Image (spheres, coloured by chain):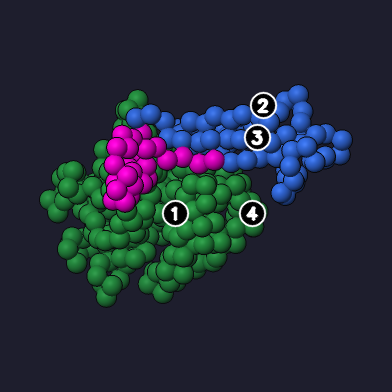
Chain colours: A blue, B green
Amino acid sequence: MAAAKAASATQKRAAGARLRTVRVTVRLKPGVLDAQGQAIKKGLDALGYGGVAALRAGRYYEIDMPDAPDLEARVRAMCEGLLANTLIEEFRYDVD
Amino acid sequence: MTIGIVVFPGSNCDADTYHVLRDVLSQDARYVWHRETSLDGLDAVILPGGFSYGDYLRAGAIASTSPVVRALRGYAAAGRPVLGICNGFQTLVETRLLPGALLLNAAGEFRCRYVRIRVERTDTPFTCALREGEVLRIPIAHGEGRYYLTDQELARMIVERQIAFRYCDAAGHATLEANPNGAIDNIAGVASVSGTVLGLMPHPERASEAIVGSADGLRILESVVQWIRTRPAREGATPRRAAAVPAVPAASSEGR
């Protein structure tokens, strides 16, 4: 994937096709124990940030890729194929 | 007989596995670099423990995209024996050669200690020298070992006899206390339906000589040697063996 480093969305050009920035968030499906989120919440508690009722951990990706009619289909395939393990994780994305 | 040990950037149990195969079991072994694209000539392939690609993304996820794993899919589809240990097991589930997923331990911490596992299935290349129900004492060392899959998938897995090992206590009971990571149904190792692909979280190669505290793990690696010896090379899949495989009369597998 031709990722332009540190370029703003308006500056990006790749062989004529405008680069779009896709922002993907992956997190555990509801019902799957989030041991990492629980540990982070305990850390907040220990620092005195009481009142946090729940905390879920996840991952975030920014992907620059050429615009195309099948852009979203490709993003979904990338999420299902590698970025998320759909057995345990769900993903959402938006495109700039 | 040559057994391949795959080396990914970040593998760290490859040399231990090599040592046990070569120096303890006197078998031929060779390292297979992750960029290699052929597994021809290997009688079995082992994916060793470690932190391939720094465990980036998810443990085993990047390794599942490597050239050698592409070759491994064909190798496994041909019914040839594939063993995944710890990070190798994680790679096999990320590759979908085995069902399920391995999540962060329920306690949220890395666990490094001896556990006991009960042998649930003996008609696989990696358990054929074991007796069903016997208890092995082998160490674990992992942060992401909580085996998980949905209840429906678990039910199907039980029907297909895909559970190879369960965490248990000294008496062989799969109790909550004996489960080091919160794995569903105390699952420590799973096999493909045919049994030729097997993954487990405990490290048999770290328990293969009495001097290191236990030699129980050696019997898992002895199994594959026995399997290869007693089967003509390149025979197809469906290794449903008769239960007539003689159990190796190893000294009590427990508490050594």
Q: How far apart are marks 4 and 1 (CA)?
A: 21 Å
Q: Give the range drawn in magenta.
A: A32-60
B231 shown above or below B209:
above
Q: How far apart are marks 3 and 4 (CA)?
A: 36 Å
Q: Residue at x 58, y 41 (%)?
A: A61
Q: Can you identify the residue that label 3 sits on? A: A22
Residue A69 image position (x, y, % from top left)? 76, 24
Q: Which amino acid does label 1 sit on?
A: Asn
Based on the displayed image, in which of its 4 quarters is residue B159 positioned?
top left
Q: Earlier in the sequence, mark 3 or mark 2?
A: 3
Indicate yes or no whether the magenta region holds residue B212: no
Q: Which of marks 4 and 1 is nearer the N terminus?
A: 4
Eye-nearest disc, 4 or 1: 1
Q: Can you identify the residue that label 2 sits on? A: A72
Q: Say which mark, if any, is on residue B38.
A: 4
Residue A4 image position (x, y, % from top left)? 75, 46
Do the residues under discs 1 and 2 have CB atoms within 8 angstroms? no
Q: How far apart are marks 1 and 2 (CA)?
A: 32 Å
Residue B256 image position (x, y, % from top left)? 19, 67
Q: Are marks 4 and 1 on the same chain?
A: yes
**Seen in the image, is A75 located left or right of residue A56?**
right
Residue A86 image position (x, y, % from top left)? 49, 32
Q: Say which mark, if any, is on residue B131.
A: none
Q: Do labels 3 and 2 share a chain?
A: yes
Q: Residue at x 45, y 45 (%)?
A: B197
Give the crowd class for mark 3: few <14, some 14-19, many >=20 residues within 10 Å.
some
Q: Which residue is drawn at 55% across and 65% down?
A: B31
Seen from the viewer's position, the closer of residues B132 and A26 is A26
Q: Can you identify the residue that label 1 sits on? A: B87
